[in-house]
Image (cartoon, rainbow, N blue to C red):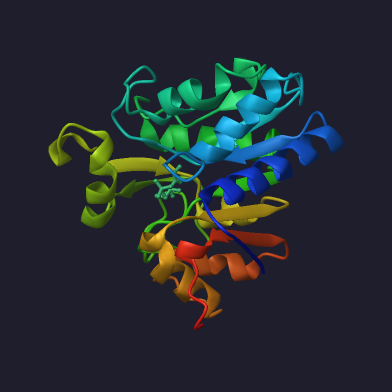
Amino acid sequence: MKIIVKDNYKGLSRFAAECIQKQVQYNPGSVLGLATGSTPLGLYERLVQDYKVGGTDYSKVSTINLDEYVGLSKTHPQSYHMFMKENLFSLVNIASRNTYIPDGKAKHLEEECKRYDRIINTIGPPDLLILGIGENGHIGFNEPGSSFEGQTHIVELKESTRRANARLFSSIEEVPKQAITMGIKSILYSKKILLLASGEKKKEAIGQLLTGKIDEQFPASALHLHPNVTVVVDELAYNRQI
Ligand code: F6R
């Protein structure tokens, strides 16, 4: 696992955007694995800026998102479908038929998980997967205790995760209690992984990750089992004492 420390969020976002741009320039038909949340917002903003000035071409790119809330329609303002549309997909020339996100409104959720695994296996694996990290070490929505052998599955969201995400809803009651997420096994199937963490709130999780201890109670530690992971943090998320 490689660690890169950037001065601030801007530097982190720039670095991550350059990794994606290089990947797509190297292979225009790249498959990108994508996350939502606050962390990749700066990265998506930079991709859009670069695209607008005639940069990278996404017409042959496919994307596979990590997760979606159960019960939210694709047009719900807080759905991850909407997040991706508003922050990236509608702003660059990605073909919407090449973008994949689990369907949180699927009638048969177990079937939806299997369908999504088939997508990962046929379209994927991602050449480059972008990950954020939860304060409790979750990746995707794989909460502490998730099996490292898990593929796409339904998860019950921890109260702490619902609270952390409540800022985007009008109240915590509105935050869904379940989500569909790529499992850790599917995440590790990606060819390259870039984990991004910014801000003081992530310092403890990054500290724990960098101890190198592998433990199912700390999902991000599974990344030590992967040969090509780069952790990009800003100064606030990095504890130099470790
Ligand atoms: C989102 C996801 C989550 C987030 C994590 C950090 O698709 O998979 O694991 O990456 O909760 O969220 P932020 O970036 O909002 O701190």
In the displayed orientation, state which residue is furthest to the bottom: 241
Q: Quadrant of residue 175?
A: top left
x%, y% of residue 17? 66, 40
x%, y% of residue 210? 54, 75
194 relative to 214 in the view: left or right: right
103 relative to 178 in the view: left or right: right
| Front residue of 213 and 57 | 57
Q: Is residue 185 visible?
A: yes
Q: Quadrant of residue 230?
A: bottom right
| Front residue of 50 and 180 | 50
x%, y% of residue 9? 52, 50
The image shows a total of numbered marks equal to: 0
Residue at (28%, 35%) from the top-left corner?
A: 168
Quadrant (top left, top right, bottom left, bottom right) of the N terminus: bottom right
Residue 93 sits above or below residue 206 on the image: above
In the displayed orientation, state which residue is furthest to the right: 26
| Front residue of 185 and 107 | 185
239 relative to 163 in the view: left or right: right
180 relative to 65 in the view: left or right: left
Residue 55 sits above or below residue 154 on the image: above
In the displayed orientation, state which residue is furthest to the front: 7
Residue at (59%, 51%) from the top-left corner?
A: 12
Residue at (53%, 35%) from the top-left corner?
A: 116
x%, y% of residue 126? 68, 42
Q: Quadrant of residue 23?
A: top right
Residue at (78%, 34%) from the top-left corner?
A: 24
Q: Is residue 148 visible?
A: no
